[in-house]
Image: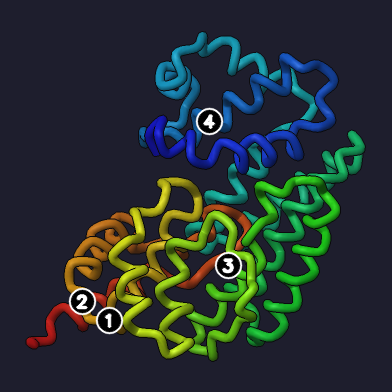
């Protein structure tokens, strides 16, 4: 993600950081925590301290001191997200449990909101029942609604349910007044198709920008890819394939630690098959 993409998700990132670092006693510690998360999200494969600090333009020793001296070890949530993207839920469970223990010890109740979403994601990815996963997502959303983080909350539950239904091929039915929040441009084409409005869906697909390069990047490209296939928009299909290919071995969206639309490889296979068809 570049600085422009980071600016587009600023509110969500700040609210996420506020929840994670709420228990830190000093405002400078909380500000450094937010800076650290920004560095993790900026472009650059190396996430060790010195290159991360260089991308931020700050002293790497300041970030290093934050991580080594804070009572709250944010790396548990970051590593939980990273392992989720690779479907390594055994390790993810260990980080979730460690985060919960630290949160309980230091009275950081909001951390439990994020680990509850992680467990709903885990159930969606590994559980035998899509209905149970949807129920878990709804329970997690209820907890999030009480956490005073509207920038994170808005649109997240319907997106999680949409992702679950797209992955499993279940009917995509939502109320017309469903609030998709910041995810609207990328889910609207598919939702319009389910309402038998192909012309409107085609127009919405043409107007949709590339998703922001954040932790939901692939999760938003996958329903966009499904809509592109259904509408035979080869330009959008090629763009989706290009953007999804680097994450071919990951679970789409699971790097958020909150939801998934299934293996990226599944959507790449659909795109390759659709693009190989002659008109």
Q: Which residue is mark 3?
A: 159
The residue drawn where x is 64% and y is 80% is 175
Q: Is residue 60 above or below residue 251?
A: above
Tell us which disc is closer to us: 2 or 1.
1
* Earlier sequence position, callout 4 versus callout 3: 4
* The N terminus lies in quadrant: top left
Pick the front one: 166 or 7:
7
Tell us which disc is closer to us: 4 or 3.
3
* Earlier sequence position, callout 1 versus callout 3: 3
Q: Which residue is mark 2?
A: 272
Q: CA distance from mark 1 to mark 3?
A: 21 Å
Pick the front one: 166 or 71:
166
Q: Which residue is mark 1?
A: 231
Say few, some or many: other residues with alpha carbon within 10 Å of mark 3 (under 14 / 14 to 19 / 20 or more).
Answer: many
Residue 88, numbered label: none
Q: Is residue 57 above or below residue 155?
A: above
Say few, some or many: other residues with alpha carbon within 10 Å of mark 1 (under 14 / 14 to 19 / 20 or more).
Answer: some
The residue drawn where x is 54% and y is 85% is 172
Question: Percent from the top left, x then y, of residue 171?
Answer: 54, 90
Tell us which disc is closer to us: 1 or 3.
1
Tell me the element at label 4: helix
């Amino acid at each position: 993600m570049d600085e422009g993409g980071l600016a587009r998700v600023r509110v969500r990132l700040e609210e996420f950081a506020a929840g994670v670092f709420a228990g830190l006693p000093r405002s400078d510690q909380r500000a450094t925590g937010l800076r650290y998360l920004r560095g993790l999200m900026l472009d650059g494969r190396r996430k060790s301290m010195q290159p991360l600090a260089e991308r931020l333009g700050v002293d790497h020793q300041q970030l290093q001191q934050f991580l080594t001296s804070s009572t709250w070890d944010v790396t548990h949530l970051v590593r939980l997200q990273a392992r989720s993207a690779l479907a390594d839920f055994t390790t993810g469970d260990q980080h979730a449990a460690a985060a919960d223990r630290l949160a309980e010890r230091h009275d950081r109740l909001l951390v439990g909101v994020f680990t509850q979403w992680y467990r709903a994601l885990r159930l969606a990815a590994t559980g035998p029942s899509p209905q149970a996963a949807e129920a878990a997502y709804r329970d997690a959303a209820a907890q999030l609604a009480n956490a005073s983080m509207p920038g994170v909350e808005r649109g997240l539950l319907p997106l999680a349910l949409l992702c679950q239904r797209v992955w499993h091929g279940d009917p995509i039915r939502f109320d017309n007044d469903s609030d998709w929040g910041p995810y609207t441009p990328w889910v609207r084409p598919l939702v319009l198709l389910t309402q038998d409005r192909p012309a409107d869906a085609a127009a919405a697909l043409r107007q949709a920008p590339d998703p922001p390069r954040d932790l939901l990047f692939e999760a938003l490209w996958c329903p966009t890819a499904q809509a592109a296939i259904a509408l035979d928009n080869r330009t959008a299909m090629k763009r989706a394939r290009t953007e999804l290919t680097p994450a071919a071995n990951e679970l789409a969206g699971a790097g958020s630690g909150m939801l998934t639309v299934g293996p990226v490889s599944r959507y790449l296979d659909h795109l390759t098959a659709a693009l190989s068809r002659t008109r």
